Image (tube, helix red, strand yellow):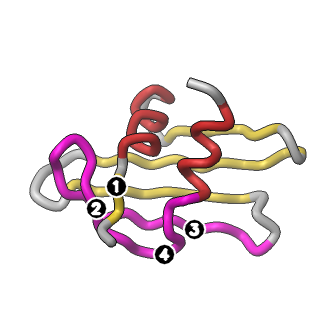
Amino acid sequence: MEHAEFDAAFKAMPEGYAEGAYEGRRFGVTVKRSEDGRRNSLFARELAGTDIVSFNLYRVASDQTSLKPCEMSTQKVVAFVLGFRPDP
């Protein structure tokens, strides 16, 4: 997985609350971005289950980011961002 692929997928996610699908399951997702774009967060909860995905993403320089998953693996976070499809 390239950094650019993850970055593009996260930027495409709508800010605020949205619902959509990941691996055939429904999730409610909240994305927050600071006005300057340096502080970002995502919290997703499976609507008919118990799974969650949560992370903070800090842009420390124009080409550098620091991904901080909340008590889960980086791989889980990356897979979710790349695979989540918001409802139209």
Q: Position of residue 23 (x, y in %)?
A: 22, 41
Q: Which residue is mark 4?
A: 16
For the stretch drawn in magenta, the main secondary structure is strand
Q: Position of residue 63 (x, y in %)?
A: 85, 40
Determine contact: label 2, label 1, CB under 8 Å: yes
Determine contact: label 2, label 4, CB under 8 Å: no
Amino acid type, label 1: Arg
> Quarter holding the C terminus?
bottom left
**Extreme left residue here?**
48
Neighbour tally class for label 4: few under 14, some 14-19, many 20 plus, Cα within 10 Å: few
Q: Which residue is mark 2?
A: 20
**Extreme right residue here?**
61
CA gap, disc 2 and disc 4: 13 Å
**Residue at 84% across / 45% down in the picture?**
60
Could you tell which of marks 3 and 2 lies nearer the N-terminus?
2
Determine contact: label 1, label 3, CB under 8 Å: no
Of helix, strand and loop, which one carries label 1? strand
Amino acid type, label 4: Gly
Q: Which residue is mark 1?
A: 85
Of helix, strand and loop, which one carries label 4? strand
Could you tell which of marks 1 and 3 lies nearer the N-terminus?
3
Determine contact: label 3, label 2, CB under 8 Å: no
> Quarter holding the N terminus?
top right
**Residue at 22% across / 54% down in the picture?**
46
CA gap, disc 4 and disc 1: 15 Å
Amino acid type, label 2: Gly
Q: Is residue 38 within the magenta segment?
A: no
Q: Which residues are drawn in magenta?
A: 12-35
Of helix, strand and loop, which one carries label 2? strand
Amino acid type, label 3: Lys
Front of the two marks 2 and 4 = 2
